[in-house]
Structures are given as structure tokens and as C-alpha cells.
Amino acid sequence: MQIKYITLRHMKMRMKKPFTTSFGTQQDKEFILVEVKNTDGLSGWGESVAFTEPLYKEETVKTNWHIMEDFLIPLLLKEPITHPDQVSERFAHIKGNYMAKSALEGAVWDLYAKEKGIPLAKALGGEKKTIEVGISIGIQKSIDQLLQVIEQHVNEGYKRIKVKIKPNWDIEVIRAIRQKFPDIQLMADANSAYTLADVDHLAKLDEYNLMMIEQPLAHDDIIDHAELQAKIKTPICLDESIHSAEDVRKAIKLGSCKIINIKIGRVGGLTEAKKIHDLCQKNGIPVWCGGMLESGVGRAHNIAITTLSNFTMPGDTAASSRYWEEDIIDPEVTVENGVIFIPDRPGIGYEPNREKIEERTLFSKTFRP
Ligand code: OSB
Ligand code: MG
């Protein structure tokens, strides 16, 4: 693979509706789009999933730009690579900064698959032709309002409903949902809003037959989660705490969770995501693909990784139209009855629309070897 140049674009897209979690509300989505162009004129695309504020994890749009421009891009342009697995090897001595690494590595994976003329899903070893997806619903103004939103998405066919919870928006909310929808696949995501002092409170969720509770405790913890998991029946799923296969090995050893949410950006890219997938599969831990309110480019990467066989639970990759009036890819991601059909075009399989990208670019910079 001969890289001719790399372009970073700082993007801004307005979401249809604000999205509220235990850590805050988001309406405008800013992110970095990465384009890696080879000497044959093919482009690979990646997306950084960092937000503008360090509220989910510590990385931000600006720290990602800094790390890419000053450290990662020079490493990538230093000498040619022959396989995308070499990107994470080349970045390995740079600590942390997973989302920055992942955005570049994702673009290289897309370009690699396009050079080979195969879908990214296939390049990753994925065999599914369709994937089942769920939807993540933010905190609403009232329980009534939440029940209406859930009803709409259940009717659209989404395979499981995830709701965001936080102290004072939890047990009562889940009870009301279960009363109205006794049979849906339901789960709750706390985004680290609780501590071990809440064990008895969280144990009250046990009677509502939740598939899992996602990241109830601190964003960097696997010790307290192990203690909590020993005391509640609801399976714990780790999101924020997991950055690598090494983290997963330790979490399994401690019994910190029974399920893992894989976000490509949070673990430094597709190569590490695959390693985590394989390790979980060997240990009987199901995985699913999380979301970061991505544009179509990030969404396409999520769809590709979800074709691997141990992604046995519906993820958060909902349709483009759930987030955007207009996405930046052609075609947009569509969901029929909770199912996405895997494109069989080369690479990510959805074409970034340059006109739409241009309209949403705040600024851009190009780097050459
Ligand atoms: O924890 O999974 C999360 C959105 C923003 C930040 C963190 C999370 C989420 C979601 C929504 O749950 C996922 C999506 O629809 O893209
Ligand atoms: Mg989460």
C-alpha cells in the first residue's frame, strides 16, 4: 500500500434530536473524518468517535487531532505498510489515544479492502450476510414520553431496546417499560453513574429480566464491577472500562462482566476489536457492537465488524435516519425489521458523498509523505 496523502476533516453535523446520557446532552456532533489516498487514486475512510468534551472518556476531537497530526500520521507516512495489522504495531508505543489510532487504522483497513477488491467485512473474516441491530434511547423528559419513543422503535422492528439510566431515572423507568413491553429484549446503560454504595439499589433491577446492565460503575474500573457482578443476577456488560484484549483477559479473570460491548474506536481499531472478539469467543463471552452516534462512515465500520460470528447480540448500529436528516454516505444505512443487509461492494461498501462532506467541514488539512 503506497499512501499518497492523508486528509483530516473536522466535521460538524446536527443530529435530528438531542441525545441525553447520564453524563450530558448532545445535539451537534463534531468529529474527525480521515481519508487515506493511495497512489492509484483509491480512498480509504475512517472516523474518530471522540466527542468535543471528555465526558464519556478522556479523548476529545482536539486531542485526537493533535495526536494524529503530531505523532500518528508521521509514523504512518514514514514507510509503506503491506497489511493494516501493521498500523497498530507501529502505533503500539504511543500510549492510550485509542480513538485517534482507530480513526487512521480504520481508513487503512478500508483502503486495504478496496485494493483487494473485497468488502471490509470479508477482509476482517466476517461471514454473516445480515446483522441484527437494536437501538439506544437517551434519557427523556418523562416516562410517558420514553414509552412512546420505545413503542415507535419496537414497531420499526429493532431487535432490542437499550435505555439510558442514571440515579433517579432507573428502577421506576425500567418497571414502567416492563409493564408495557413484557417480552422485548431490554437492557440499560448507566455510563458509569453509580458506585458500590448502590449495590442494593442496582439489585432491584434483577426482577425485570434485563439482558444486561452496561457499565454501571466507574469508567476505568474492573475491580468493583467484579464485586457487583457477584451480588446481582443481571449480567454486567463492560463498555468504558475496556480498551484492549489485555483488559478483557483481566476482566474475565476477575469476573467483572459476562458480556462485552466492543466499540472499534474505544479499543484502538479493528485489529484490536478482532482480537477481543476472538478472546471473548474462546471464553464463552458474547459480544455486541456499541455506537458513538457516528456518521455513515463510522457506522459502516461497525456494520463490517459485526459480521464476525461472536457478535451474537444486537448492537447499537441503528439506521442513518435515526440520527441525521441526511447522512454523508450513499446509500445511507437502512434497517428493515431490525436487520441490516451487508453490502458486497469493496471496502466499507458505502460511498462517502464529497459534496455533503464539504458542506459539513469546518476545516481540513492534508499531510504528505
Ligand atoms: O455508552 O454506548 C454508549 C452514545 C454516546 C456515548 C456513549 C454511548 C452512546 C450510546 C448511543 O449508547 C449509541 C448510538 O446510538 O450510536
Ligand atoms: Mg455504553
Image: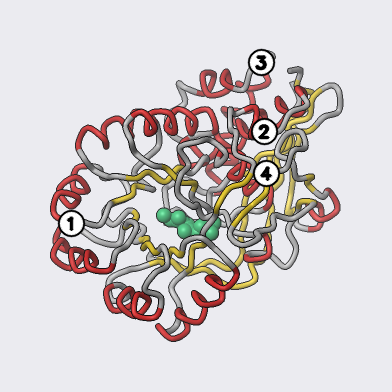
Where is the N terminus found, in terms of image quarters? top right
Which residue type carries mark 1? Answer: Ile
Q: Quadrant of residue 301?
A: top right
Q: Residue at x 77, y 37 (%)?
A: 345
Question: CA gap, disc 2 to disc 4?
Answer: 10 Å
Depth check: give the residue in front, 16 or 93.
16
- Does 93 sit left or right of 251 as displayed? right
Characterize the local packing of mark 3: few (<14), some (14-19) or many (20 or more) Cα atoms within 10 angstroms: some
Residue ID for mark 3? 81
Is residue 52 visible in the rendered image? The answer is no
Which residue type carries mark 4? Answer: Ile
Is label 4 in a helix, a strand or a loop? loop
* Mark closest to the chain's N terminus, 2 or 4: 2
Which residue type carries mark 2? Answer: Leu
Is label 1 in a helix, a strand or a loop? loop
- Does 93 sit left or right of 153 as displayed? left
Question: CA gap, disc 1 to disc 3?
Answer: 47 Å
- Does 34 sit left or right of 97 as displayed? right
* Mark closest to the chain's N terminus, 1 or 3: 3
Are the two marked residues, 3 and 2, in contact with CB atoms closer than 8 angstroms? no
Find residue 221 and report its horizontal and vertical position in percent.
26, 45
Find residue 118 and report its horizontal and vertical position in percent.
74, 28
Find residue 126 and report its horizontal and vertical position in percent.
58, 33
Are the two marked residues, 1 and 3, in contact with CB atoms closer than 8 angstroms? no
Residue ID for mark 4? 342
Which residue type carries mark 3? Answer: Ile
Which of discs 3 and 4 lies nearer the camera? The answer is 4
Question: CA gap, disc 3 to disc 4?
Answer: 28 Å
* Residue 232 image label: 1
